Image (cartoon, helix red, strand yellow):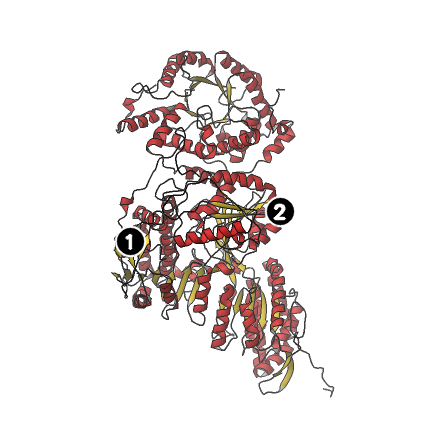
Amino acid sequence: MPTAPAHALTDATTSDRTLRRFLHGLPGVDTVGLEARASALGTRSIKTTAKAYAIDLAISMIDLTTLEGADTPGKVRALGAKAVNPDPTDRGTPKTAAVCVYPDMVATAKEAVGDSGVKVASVATAFPAGRAAIDVKLGDVREAVAAGADEIDMVIDRGAFLAGDYMTVFEQIRAVKEASGEARLKVIFETGELSTYDNIRRASWIGMLAGADFIKTSTGKVGVNATPANTLLMLEAVRDFREQTGVQVGVKPAGGIRTSKDAIKFLVLVNETAGQDWLDNHWFRFGASSLLNDLLMQRQKLATGRYSGPDYVTVD
Amino acid sequence: MSDRLTVLKTYKLYVGGKFPRSESGRVYEVTDSKNKWLANAPLSSRKDARDAVVAARKAQGGWAGKTAYLRGQILYRVAEMLEGRKDQFVREVADAEGLSKSKAAVVVDAAIDRWVWYAGWTDKVAQIVGGGNPVAGPFFNLSSPEPTGVVTVVAPQESSFLGLVSVIAPVIATGNTAVVIASENSPLPALSLGEVLATSDLPGGVVNILSGRTAEITPSLASHQDVNAIDLAGVEDDDLAKELEVAAADNLKRVVRPQPVDWSADPGTHRLTAFLETKTVWHPTGSLGASGSSY
Amino acid sequence: MTSTPSASAAFEYAPAPESRSVVDIAPSYGLFIDGEFAEAADGKVFKTVSPSTEEVLSEVAQASSEDVDRAVKAARKAFEKWSALPGAERAKYLFRIARIIQERSRELAVLETLDNGKPIKETRDADLPLVAAHFFYYAGWADKLDHAGYGADPRPLGVAGQVIPWNFPLLMLAWKIAPALATGNTVVLKPAETTPLSALFFADICRQAGLPKGVVNILPGYGDAGAALTAHPDVDKVAFTGSTAVGKAIARQVAGTDKKVTLELGGKGANIVFDDAPIDQAVEGIVTGIFFNQGQVCCAGSRLLVQESVQDEVLDALKRRLSTLRLGDPLDKNTDIGAINSAEQLARITALTETGEAEGAERWSAPCELPSSGYWFAPTLFTNVTQAHTVARDEIFGPVLSVLTFRTPEEAVAKANNTQYGLSAGIWTEKGSRILAVADRLRAGVIWANTFNKFDPTSPFGGYKESGYGREGGRHGLEAYLDV
């Protein structure tokens, strides 16, 4: 069994019983109140200099993602080039944080981003369903790491979680963390399948207790992915976790964030919930693909005063 | 009939479930409509009124906390007990109001029936005046009536029994407790009612009955900071009514002003709802899961 | 408290002011009597200022008792025809008014923010939507009064004299005028002297809606005009929202008359947080409870009763949350905390908080820079407060929260009820049966469980004890304006 991290809450994970007790002792979440807070923060009006700041920050936080059965080396190379140089008309545009691909595309992606500083993230652990034996999942992770992945995006075993087998979920994350070595680990909950906010809060704490570097909403492969409310809830979790343990954990909403307006709302959530310390791509990411072009068009509008159009950003 | 000397009754106050004399030791003569002496009634003081408020306050939470069904049963029990002592009340009402025995019997019957009417209201009034409110948001919102608390009731002067019952029953049906000032000149039916209430499973303190001078007792009750409402039904002097209403404003008592009332008519719900507060409770409803959950 | 930008790397929100150009404030306004704007009989005027800048917005005619008499006469004259109109026709006037309010809502929101000092976020998202909704709701009642539970064909009372406060000027107007007109009464309304403008704009809305002359009369003025109105012998119905002291004075004034009265007065609402509360939402509820409208709300949750076992956790979270509140220009869309309505109110808040400190309560505010002109008060917490402290008993009517602790539900209820007021209370716990048990025992007219400061036209509002009597809103709100 992998060793647990050393912090104030290690007692919580000494047994299935203590873990269950700890998770069920977390404060409940009132659905209406949480969603009302998320939507109230959504009314912030981010204009001019603040908007320019937010757009550049959002671009720099994108994990530019392609996770299709039809992914080819050519598609991944194009994505890598876009990540490094999002707007050919303005070289001052920030790079994205990473590209995110399947494990077998990691080597291609690494080559495409070169030494630009753009990271390569790989989904693993039988993404997106996570329905495979632990050995298969760990093999998946090792393959990605061996190919040079800087970051691993794993999925938790939602079946085990919903069956109440929290320790299995915890131990699998620990095992994946160990297999990830130096790579930073993002733990995907698939919030749409966990269904309730109480579950999302519990999953967040399992992930953080098990050593996640990031907690991540979703795969982008189910009906409901990142929402302002579930992201707000996870931001509260990382905020509270740092307060109790001193350990900072990142947050990555993924799937469904398509417009600059949406992205800026998420940044407001970060700013007013977890705070300034998370306003950096080391601690906050967007799992997205089409979002980037919208941000680029908005960026061009701010620069030129004209509304841009899809012909003035690149199609990948 | 033998020439046996009858045993006269000593009329006493009814406070906190007990039958005390006035703490002042005073009594006053009660006569019938032909000025014939009937009895000596306690002449209550302000201290008696104060004690009655204490008793009423003490009883209020418990009485309001009983199920409406049980309150209904107890009010019905009052009707049952009165039915058994009808002859006594017919005699007292006839003496008090100068009515023939048969007319007095009609009044007493109506008073008994009034208890039955209010007994049936206890578990219905919330459904008539409360209910859910369809607010424009994810909230469950329910308004329910609650008793306002301790109510001072100045009973009607002329209708010493039917009027009395008509002002007490609605107050307690809804969970309030009452401090009642009986008709000044005709307090005997009221004092006897106390004996009936005491044997009707009505908890002590729910109804407290004082006899005496209306003008003497009422001002301290109108200004009493631990009284929540006042029914001025029996205040016949306009200046006194105004003075009492002014005093009642000190703690914003709910006031029912004196009005001409035909006590034999259908009472409606006015007195039943006059001593109710509406409490509205909100609670989020939300959804089964996180917003947009696929389940 | 975020008020000025600091490090350049930080996510500082640039100013996002709502445009003032949507509202055209005239240099002067008259009284609105019998469908016409008119000068005061004695020619008196007063200035209304923007509390956030002290800029004079306009000069407004100041009603005296002579004007009150004129307005009541106009309302009396209009009553005959208005009350005889079929309910369906009265309904259509009210629907028109509701629609015009919706059309002009941005203009009215900006106007209200200018005259009152509250953030545009609130006037835009709370006040104005509720104002329109209130007129819509009562419009629908006008032709359904037979079904309201007050017997067949319930009759209006006559002329309603209404006096409203400055904290929600247009919303309080809606709460008063909508049910009055729906039931067939006519109205003389006095807005507060610090916030007369939205009521005068409402007069213009009545004109646009074609409302018959004299049905609504608006008399800007001071307390003397209010007293003259509530005392007027030809006023059948008095509706007042404001302080408990004035409410008591009105109750004395109407003693011995046939006037029907509703009073919506002060409060000292307890917001009770149990150890099993949804803490993050509870913190939001505490903030909404006391800092909504700068705490100038009669139903504010001005006493936080927190279970001692979670006191530190809740207070830490609360303080952290307070440091994100944005105080400043009320017209900025990102402003959370606006200006205090008047110098007088600011002085009252200041005096009461000084008393709090002098009595030994511990005062805390997030670091906060206040604008140099206008009336401002930083959101403030008092800890180590007991029931005996003035700040736990007196209504402060400002952004000041007194924090008390309790050990058991029994103690929480006892402390919550230990006040002469009884308007609102909050309960935070995930345990359903506890909510119901505590809600049942609290002596307050509005209980918010796991939420706070929610309002709706269908939901009756009003207090127990010295918070007043009568209910506004919902079916219950009709009773105040019907002869039943």
Mark 2 belongs to chain: C
Density class for disc 2 (Cα within 10 Å; few <14, some 14-19, many ≥20) is: some
| Depth order, front residue of A255/C463 | C463
Mark nearer the viewer, 2 or 1: 1
The residue sitting at 32% across, 32% down in the picture is: A48
- SS category of the residue bearing label 2: loop
Q: Note whether residue B154 is visible.
A: no
Q: Note whether residue C418 is visible.
A: yes
Closer to the N terminus: mark 2 or mark 1?
Answer: 1
Q: Amino acid at mark 1?
A: Ser
What is the x, y in percent for residue C279? 54, 40
Give the labeled residue for mark 2: C407
- SS category of the residue bearing label 1: strand
The residue sitting at 54% across, 14% down in the picture is: A139
User: What is the quadrant of residue C120 in the picture?
Assistant: top left
The residue sitting at 53% across, 52% down in the picture is: C392
If the image is split into quadrants, where does the N terminus of chain B sit?
bottom right
Mark 1 belongs to chain: C
For residue C58, the mark is: 1
| Depth order, front residue of C460/B97 | C460
What is the x, y in percent for residue A160? 57, 27
